[in-house]
Amino acid sequence: MLENGKLYIGTSRNPDDSLNKPEYLELKFGNRHGIVTGATGTGKTVTLQVLAESFSNAGVPVFCADIKGDLSGIAAIGEAKDWVSKRAEQIGFNDFAFQEFPVIFWDLYGEKGHRVRTTIAEMGPLLLSRLMDASEAQEGVLNIAFKIADQGGLPLMDLKDLQALLNYMGEHATELSNQFGLISKSSVGSLQRGLLVLEQQGAEHFFGEPALKISDIMRTTNDGRGAISVLAADKLMMNPRLYATFLLWLLSELFEELPEVGDPDKPKLVFFFDEAHLLFNDAPKVLTERVEQVVRLIRSKGVGVYFVTQNPLDVPETILAQLGNRVQHALRAYTPREQKAVKTAADTFRPNPAFDCATAITTLGTGEALVSTLQDKGIPSMVERTLVRPPSGRVGPLSDGERQAVINVSPVAGLYDKDLDRESAYEILTERARKAAEAEAAKRATEEQASQGASDDSAAGRWTLPGFGNDGEDEAPRSTSKNGNGGTRRSSGYQRETVIEAAMKSAARSVATSVGRALVRGILGSLRR
């Protein structure tokens, strides 16, 4: 049942439950994207594992997120469980065998896998605005921040780099606004608060160096199998916006870095986007348009994107139209929205006259799905009611010891486990601020010295008030005269004053006393107040 160039998904059956034919996904159409949908408990995770195993065996690297921890078992050889053996026998899968797969575990927090990081600069203002839930005005300020960083040679690596740059912008908002446009201090403050929220949510683990190299999630083993990169997302899902933004960033990096390859015989990488609805919840129009652009164009770079979600309505129609390979598990139709979802899912398939698609969607059993894939010339196959094959790897999580053993022998062991903090915007701006503070202190000291010198010069020509000291130093020496013995004698200095002299001295003494009282009152009065 296994054929070269094809991935065996399962076996379809007729309306009377008899087996129909094997259902395949053409490997050469694996980069035409796809979607796996269905309600909780209908078998989406097992289907994801089956597809990941099949792509790996075909030599195609895979990246997927492990939301509940169940997908980690793909790194261990499968176990003979009753339902596994029963399903293989039921669909006539005679080639079935248990197998373990080459897995690389990743984790933003470095707890259940190798650390995965990116830099603020690589994230870019659009995705960062989405992550921070920034308003239009705040996004504008963030774009200016990136422009200033580019022109000023300020590498933005981690959160403290962006925080330092925002501080700088707030302090120099007026002069920067004249050059780059209005920089509102309130918007800067809101962004700074947003950064604090991100830090509290653990985003500081995501931003920094060494940044993830795309080549490390596109590895193949010596025996030609594609490595399966599994992102531990159970803790990451506590912050759904960070989870969705990270996966979208990774998709954007693939789009920007990989060369054009046209239509290869098999994909260069297959990317599974689990819980895809988180990407589009409350997403601004510009972001949705960006996702549509990436999905539409990344096919020519050999990357297949498969959205995994509960409801087909979670994916915008413009993106849904780009998904050629479809696996639809059971949906419930209890509410008007669920009924609309069933109709939407049924209308996306090429109809099969043997059964009503909308009715079949609500009656599918666990591990059963409606399957339609691209066939020759890219034409969708007629939808078939299919029993999905059992996975060859273990179904269920690894133990902590088993996971650690896989991490220890990983081909990227030691490459991302230690933080690297090289000189970037924070260090550069801190050094500039230090030098500016030193220059300001030196200038202030020079001015104070100049002021002190001027004060000393003016002291030489100061005037005094009677009784306040220093007033006797400038008095002329008393006159002396010769006595009769040839010596000198001091004059008593007493001379009878004329009436006019006495009147003039009395008036001068009165004026000086009034000025002195006024000055003392002014100084002490201010101190008292």
Image (spheres, grey):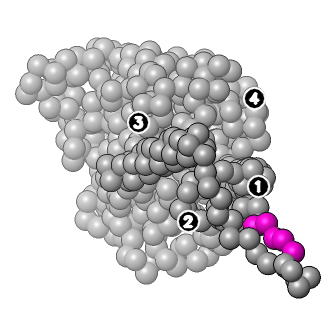
**On the rendered structure, is 457 left or right of 54?**
right
Circle 1 residues within 10 Å: few <14, some 14–19, many ≥20: few
Distance Cα–Cα, label 3 vs label 2 = 33 Å
The label nearer to you, 3 versus 4, is 3
Residue at 72% across / 44% down in the picture? 154
Distance Cα–Cα, label 1 vs label 4 = 86 Å
> What percent of the width, then of the height, locates residue 213?
68, 52
Which sits earlier in the primary sequence, circle 3 or circle 2?
A: 2
Query: Which sits in the foreground, 126 or 188?
Result: 188
Magenta stretch bounds: 478-482
- On residue 260, the disc is 4
Distance Cα–Cα, label 2 vs label 1 = 77 Å
Instruction: State the residue position of label 1.
Output: 460
Contact between labelled residues 1 and 2, with CB atoms less than 8 Å apart: no
The label nearer to you, 2 versus 1, is 1
Which sits earlier in the primary sequence, circle 3 or circle 4?
A: 3
Amino acid, disc 3: Ser
Residue at 60% across / 46% down in the picture? 498
The label nearer to you, 3 versus 2, is 3
Circle 3 residues within 10 Å: few <14, some 14–19, many ≥20: some
Instruction: State the residue position of label 3.
Output: 190
Query: Which sits in the foreground, 485 or 156?
Result: 485
Q: Secondary structure at mark 1?
A: loop
Which sits earlier in the primary sequence, circle 1 or circle 3?
A: 3
> What percent of the width, then of the height, locates residue 160?
56, 53
The chief SS type of the magenta part is strand
| View extreme (left): residue | 334
Distance Cα–Cα, label 3 vs label 4 = 40 Å
Distance Cα–Cα, label 1 vs label 3 = 58 Å
The label nearer to you, 1 versus 3, is 1
